[in-house]
Image (spheres, rainbow, N blue to C red):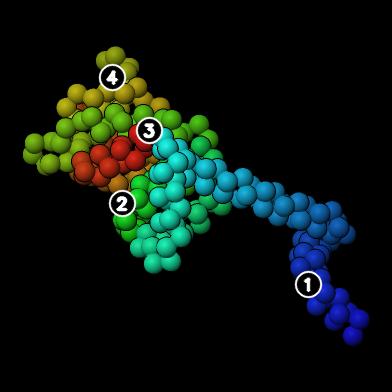
Amino acid sequence: MAQKKQVMGDGTRLALTTVAGQIAGPAGPPAVRMVETAIQWRRERGQRRAEHFAREFMESGYPNETARVELEVMLANPELPTKNVIIDAVRQLDDLVSDEVIPSLALLTREYVRAGRPKDRFFASVVRVLRDIEDGEFALFRKLVAAVARASPNRHTGRLHIAKVEEEATGRVYLWADPNIELEWDDAFAPLMRSLVANEMANVATGLALRVDMADGWVAVPETWMQLHAALASS
């Protein structure tokens, strides 16, 4: 009976002790402390990120208090059609790889709320791309998107043509976008492009030789990248 009372009174600690004991054996107590510390770290990180998100959402880019009040009124509306936008964005805070993307996530969310725009495929795709960006990659991501957004759609396909070019004669390696956009290649571009492809914001140029010196190639819908550029440029 005493044991049952202990379980009911401190079930969380008992669960932690059980898991740690199974994993670490005699090292159970240190393992419990490690798990409890990790939980505390996660809680503190979540609080810090939530405060950062709220600060950017409510204040950045607005020159007066009126705009902030406007947003607060909109958020107080229980029938807010964009509530899923806010819910999804806040839910992603715990899974972000880097804090660097929080301002863009907050500002993207804010623009949807102000426009009364419900969650859509574009929002979901951008959020997933931002979620997976690592420390030090966000500036490169914005640079990549800005470069491609300056390109023109191919006159035959109506799509943006993007390639990693390796010039054998000169040894140059750069990102190219039709017709004449060039950006020095960074190794971070490859995983960023893979993420964009995985989230349906670009497609691999399978069977389509965009250039004879192309190492890798992609095609994309111009409107999608213009939207993406606009979303990132405001942060």
In the rendered structure, find residue 144 and report the number of the disc placed on it.
none
Residue 128: x and y in percent read 42, 50
Secondary element at image label 2: helix
Asked if the residue under mark 1 is in contact with the one under mark 3, i.e. CB atoms within 8 Å, the reply is no
SS category of the residue bearing label 1: helix
Which residue in the structure is indicated by mark 2? 115
- Element at badge 4? loop
> Crowding at label 1, few (<14), some or many (≥20) Cα neighbours within 10 Å?
few
On the question of residue 8 being in view, the answer is: yes
- Residue type (three-letter) at the residue carrying disc 3: Arg
Of labels 4 and 2, earlier in sequence is 2
Most extreme residue toward the bottom is 1
Per the model, the C-alpha gap separating discs 3 and 1 is 47 Å
Residue highlighted by disc 4: 168
Say which residue appears at 67% left-offset and 53% top-offset: 43
Measured in 3D between alpha carbons, the distance from the residue under mark 3 to the one under mark 4, in whole angstroms, is 28 Å
Q: Quadrant of the N terminus?
A: bottom right
Q: Are marks 4 and 1 in contact (CB under 8 Å)?
A: no
- Residue reaching furthest to the front: 66
Identify the residue position indicated by label 3 in the image: 142
Q: CA distance from mark 4 to mark 1?
A: 65 Å
Instruction: Single out the mark in the foreground, 3 or 4.
Output: 3
Q: Amino acid at mark 1?
A: Gly
- Disc 3 on helix, strand or loop? helix
Outermost residue on the right side: it is 2
